[in-house]
Amino acid sequence: MDSLQHHLAHTLKTQRSARGWSLTQAAEATGVSKAMLGQIERAESSPTVATLWKIATGFNLPFSVFIEPPAVDSATPRRQQQGYSAFDSAMQVFPLFPFDAALNFEMLVIELAAGASSASAAHERGVIEHVIVIEGELELQVEGQWQRLAAGEGVRFQADCAHAYRNAGTKPVRFHDLIHYPPR
Ligand code: MN
């Protein structure tokens, strides 16, 4: 079994018991079925990126917490090597800088295949996303309004409302997503 699946299973189980939630309560909080949550906890199944986002949002936890252990200070250069794509190759997420609990942010590199889109539920109050396009063209929807971002352009928005990302182009789009979480 790969270590990513293992880490995910362990994190989900630990976070759920820390809240004293049953699988039913966790399903209500995340919108992910009880059966699916059970399978993930037993490392029998890898969620799609979309499912993992739902879980992270329902638990009010940063996405990268489920992918790798918290950041430690290190001057070793990090690189986008291995994305998290599980069963959908249409979207890959790589935590360039995993969640830092002292600074309350994570920085992800996200790649969306041509024609792919991803809808995100509202994050908890106070979450702010900074989206900077590196390559390709991204369409971003915030509060019902679509806007187009070219490579080199960035936008910052309050992410405590529904938002979505879309690649209407014919080439993959790659962007940075720096997500700031409210202090605990
Ligand atoms: Mn989001």
Image (tube, rainbow, N blue to C red):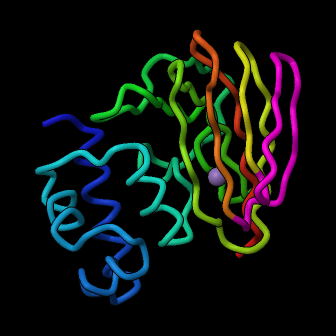
Q: Quadrant of the N terminus?
A: top left
Q: Position of residue 119 (x, y in %)?
A: 56, 50
Q: Residue at x 74, y 74 (%)?
A: 125
Work out whether residue 173 or residue 96 is closer to the camera in this orientation and state it. 173
**33 lies left or right of 129:** left
- Who's the residue at 56% across and 25% down the image? 111
Q: Nearer the viewer, residue 169 or 95?
A: 169
Please say if 110 is above or below 51.
above
**Where in the figure is residue 152, as x and y percent of width and height?**
86, 18
Q: Position of residue 155 (x, y in %)?
A: 87, 39
Q: Residue at x 48, y 61 (%)?
A: 56
What are the residue bounds of the magenta stretch? 142-161
Classify residue 62 by image quadrant. Answer: bottom right
Left or right of residue 120: residue 175 = right
Query: Residue at image x 55%, y 19%?
Result: 80
Q: Is residue 156 magenta?
A: yes
The correct choice, above or below, for 135 with respect to 42 in the image is: above
The x, y position of residue 59, in whole percent, is: 48, 72
Membership of 151 in magenta stretch? yes
Whether 48 is drawn above or below 96: the answer is below
Quadrant for the C terminus, please.
bottom right
